[in-house]
Amino acid sequence: TQAGSTDPLATGSTFCNWRLVAYLCLIPGGLLFTTMFLAPETPRWLATRGKLERAEAILRKVRGVDAGDHKEEYIEEELNALKSVSDARMSTKSKSDIRTRFKVLLSCPKQLVICTMNMAFTQFSGINALTFFQTTIFEMAGLKDADVLAITVRVVSTLANFPALYLVDRLGRRPLIISSAAGMCLSQFLMGLFFYLDRDGDAHNIAWLALLASYGYQFTYSWGVGPIRWMLASELFPDEARGLASAATTTVNWVCAFIFILFLDSAVQATSMQAAFWFFSCVGAVMAVFEYFMSSEKAERLSDRRALLAVAAVLPAPLLVGLCCGFTAPMIDTMQNTVTSTDGEHIELGAHSDLYVFSSTMTASFFSAALTLGALIASLSGGPISERTGRRLALLIAGPLNVISFLIIALCKNVAALIIARLIGGWSMGVCSFVCSVYISEVSPTRLRGLLGSCTQLLIGLGILLVYVFGAVCRTDGGSTDPLATSRTFCRWRL
């Protein structure tokens, strides 16, 4: 859009109409709300509430085995596990139930360290620097068509999930996550090397190195760390502590993400771009060493593939997570009126454009960080909610809240309202990020757990890709009279 800009450089695609993009992002939340009506509650959660008959009925349904069927022997182990969970529930007083769960959680210190450190390492290896600010990084590197290049990075990231789907249960988690962390380390080192060589602004002829580093990081992340880190809590902990473990690890993830995003700009200004990326590289190296010594494999067992149908309804949840995470990448420059040409010249938005909302970098940073703050709140509150009301109802609540969040972003001009909307969206995203993983792990047969768990990361990557595409399509000149502005300069982020 032109966004009312009087800048002679502005054209109809100079700015991003982010409000238009926000309208498009309403879709997955509404879809999640609709599909969860078709989804069953997880058998394990029902067993923990003493509803054994209903739990067994749903387990037989998702495995395609009728009562008395000769195939029932294939799910006998799972049926016995449900009975054990139900018996434990009936013998435990409600007052001590939460204390019992915490005791079980704390009795697994190694598993807790593995899950939480994976989340922390991932955040401080720079994943959100390349997710939230990918387009900006390419513009700083002097690359033309930065928004289009950012889309190609997301395409590579999405495609990398497919070999992970195939290999996660064949090669195992450990080799995938170690090689993934090593690749992330190398990629961030190359990104830092580019910015070091370009510290005087005269190395734009090797800007391809920044593009290569971005491809490498996103590919290797999606290959292993991306899908596996969300599975671990659901696989490593006993049934009694599974919900709390997922909530605890997700809390660590969003605490680290909030700190990272809020202080990233300040850290770069205090040091340099190359120092920041070399720090990310060091974290990746430490992560690879950590995985080598700490991670292990878990035996798997063959089960019925009909469980694919049981988890289909929950798949809009990770898509929603991806849209929330990727929203600021193509939008933030338009939102704070800092769009520049490939030569580094600032292009001014129109004076009356409603796309310019942030007058300072700190406000824009807090808007980005508010998402992770909301997700952090969800990690603390969503766990008890999903334990008390069930996985299905928690996701039914999250869908409409996400719709409300993007609707406020699309319509409101007040900065405080936009930040509150981002907090609401963060809460919805946080609930989806860990409840979805727990739901899939509790419904899936053991053999398919890695495959279906990897689908979560695939859908997150697809969501980020979609919002990048939306940002590239919904462009405007912002009503600018800047001669550098074109119809593709600014993002129509409200769309």
Image (cartoon, rainbow, N blue to C red):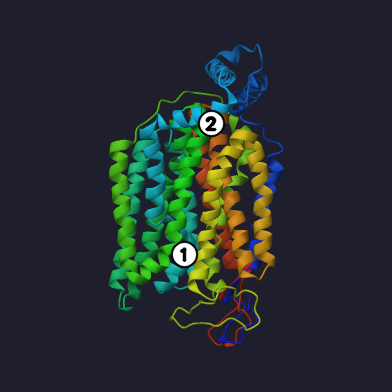
Q: Earlier in the sequence, mark 2 or mark 1?
A: 2
Secondary structure, mark 1, is loop
* 2 vs 1, front mark: 2
Against 257, residue 172 (above or below) is above
Residue at the extreme front of the image, as rendered: 95
Identify the residue at horizontal 50%, vertical 30% (top origin).
99
As rendered, which of 78 and 103 lies closer to the eye? 103
Q: Quadrant of the C terminus?
A: bottom right
Identify the residue at horizontal 63%, vertical 32% (top origin).
310
Is residue 130 visible in the rendered image? The answer is: no
Secondary structure, mark 2, is helix
Give left or right: position of 221 versus 84: left
Residue 50, position as x, y percentages in the image: 63, 22
Residue at the spot of label 2? 98
Is residue 53 visible in the rendered image? The answer is: yes
At label 2, which amino acid type do we have?
Answer: Ile
Binning the other alpha carbons within 10 Å of mark 1 as few (below 14), some (14 to 19) or many (20 upward) gives many
Give left or right: position of 252 versus 381: left
Give left or right: position of 21 versus 301: right
Residue 2, position as x, y percentages in the image: 63, 79
Q: Which mark is residue 133?
A: 1
At label 1, which amino acid type do we have?
Answer: Phe
As rendered, which of 210 and 401 lies closer to the eye? 401
